[in-house]
Amino acid sequence: MPVDYLAELTAPQRSARANLHLGAGLAFVAGALNAGGLLAVGQYTSHMTGMVSGAADHIALGQIGLALSAVVAVLAFVLGALSTAVLVNYSRRRRPVWAYVPTLVLEAALLLVFGLIGSEMLPHQIERVSLTALLLCFVMGLQNALITKISNAEIRTTHVTGLLTDLGMELGRLLYWNRNPVGPRVQADRRRLKIHASLVLAFFIGGLAGALGFKHAGFIATVPLALALVVLAAASLLRPQLQPPL
């Protein structure tokens, strides 16, 4: 049943399939927000490497205001990740079967806020960073920490640099010619290769969908993403009623 499948994606008992499917879905969302966010606020909001490097560059050039704006964006991302850790750890103690539901609901609510009133938040700034951009940075940290905790740090959905690095390494192992029949053989981990390739592809497709959505519909393009997260959370809430624990 669809409800059972969706609930499996966020169930405490994990499987490789559930991690991959959830990771790909959240990578799609991250790609859509990142690409759409560029059109909406003029910057990528998952690129924390660039933010930290930019802060260092601005300090070196004496542009303290711009450096502070980068630091504020990074702090918003960190605060999002922190919020996920608190919500998941608290939920695991109180209601383990719904451990990931609060974070999904919070992300969905923030995406609805972004879609419905994001344009009105643009003029309001903290250290030259619009509240809209900070909201997206927070959501990115929230989501990346969620899939990290769910998959035990095997999957991340916004860190494409790391995904491409791992993908290249596995491709190198796959193409390596083991000429010497004696000794250890170099072998690619085809499961990890599939995971990394799937996540990169999902992020790219999400980015394309997000850019097109923001181009033609504006901020409201995030509402379908929010509704998808609501459906995912609702499935987790309904499944215990359909399949009581043994």
Image (cartoon, helix red, strand yellow):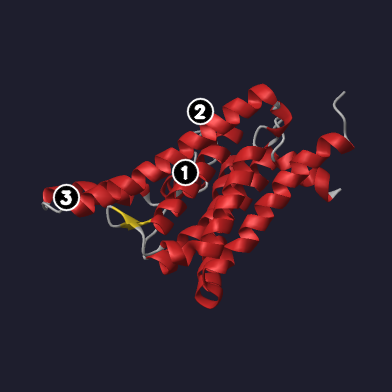
Is the residue under label 3 in contact with that under label 2 (CB below 8 Å)? no
Query: Which mark identifies residue 182?
Result: 2
Earlier in the chain: of badge 2 and badge 3, it is 3
- Judged left or right of residue 98, residue 192 is left
Residue 131 placement (x, y as % from top left): 40, 55
Kindly identify the amino acid type of the residue bearing the numbered disc 3. Answer: Ile
Residue annotated with mark 1 = 141
Q: Is residue 220 visible?
A: yes
Q: Identify the residue at image location x=82%, y=43%.
A: 4
80 shown above or below 29: above
In the image, 212: left or right of 239?
left
Mark 3 and mark 1 lie on one chain; the one further toward the N terminus is 3
Q: Residue at x 43, y 45 (%)?
A: 162
Q: Is residue 153 visible?
A: no
Image check: 23 left or right of 54? right
Mark 2 against mark 1, which lies toward the viewer? Answer: 1
Q: Position of residue 111 (x, y in %)?
A: 56, 55
Q: Which numbered mark, 3 or 1, is in the foreground of this view? A: 3
